[in-house]
Image: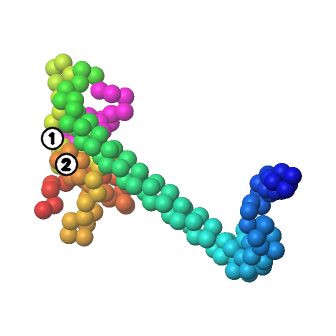
Amino acid sequence: MRKLFTTAILSIFMVTGLGASALAAPGGGHGGKHHQSRGHKQGGKHHKAKVKAKKAHAKAHRRAHRKAERRAHKAERRAHKRYQRAQRARYYKAMPRAHRRVVHRGTPYYYHDGGWYVRDRVGYVLVSSPVGAIVVDVPTWAERRVVRDRQYYFVDGSWYRYEPARRHYVVVTAPM
């Protein structure tokens, strides 16, 4: 009978979650108020500080991860652009719609995505950029370089200088 009573009491403690420590300590199983006075209970000062630090660490980790992802993405885009430039058409039967016609010193040039073309008997041939030619924009992937405190844009071996007063880019010789 005594064994049955002890088993019943223990099973009640296990079901309620108090465990065996509730039998030993008179204050509810945690040695009285000692545990709560140190701020370890949920909502206490130490617990809140710990949670706040954990959240800050997680936020910093996410930020660093996003930054690394952006850096990797930029590197991939640069590599892709290099590949695209290497695959640039040396010849077009018909120019793409986004081209611009630029007349420089009486010669009509066709500018498309950083490449300069002239009309041939059967299409358009890639040529070197004409120094002094003016364009409204350079490709978004143009490299910005500063030489002797002046800002230039470098695109496929061609150098451009922006003229803010006239809001255009001029093809210039290499500023070295």
Asked if residue 16 shows in the view, the reply is no
Asked if residue 127 shows in the view, the reply is yes
Give the Cα distance between marks 1 and 2.
Answer: 8 Å
Which residue position is annotated with label 1? Answer: 128
Specify the amino acid type for callout 1.
Ser
Q: Is residue 143 above or below residue 99?
A: below
The magenta stretch is: 95-113
Tell me residue 92's x, y (percent). Answer: 23, 24
Residue sitting at x 26%, y 36%: 84
Residue 130 horizontal side relative to residue 16, left or right? left
Q: Is residue 111 magenta?
A: yes
- The disc label shown at residue 94, or none: none
Frontmost residue, 82 versus 123 = 82
Residue sitting at x 25%, y 64%: 146
Determine crowd level at label 1: few under 14, some 14-19, many 20+ residues with C-alpha closer than 10 A: few
Q: Is residue 30 above or below residue 96?
A: below
Which residue position is annotated with label 2? Answer: 158
Q: Quadrant of residue 125?
A: top left
Residue sitting at x 50%, y 57%: 62
Q: Quadrant of residue 30?
A: bottom right
Residue sitting at x 24%, y 37%: 83
Looking at the rendered structure, the secondary structure element under dot 2 is strand
Tell me residue 56's x, y (percent). Answer: 56, 67
Circles 1 and 2 in contact, beta carbons < 8 Å: yes
Locate the C terminus and report the quarter of the image it occupies. bottom left
Determine crowd level at label 2: few under 14, some 14-19, many 20+ residues with C-alpha closer than 10 A: some
Frontmost residue, 93 versus 35 = 35
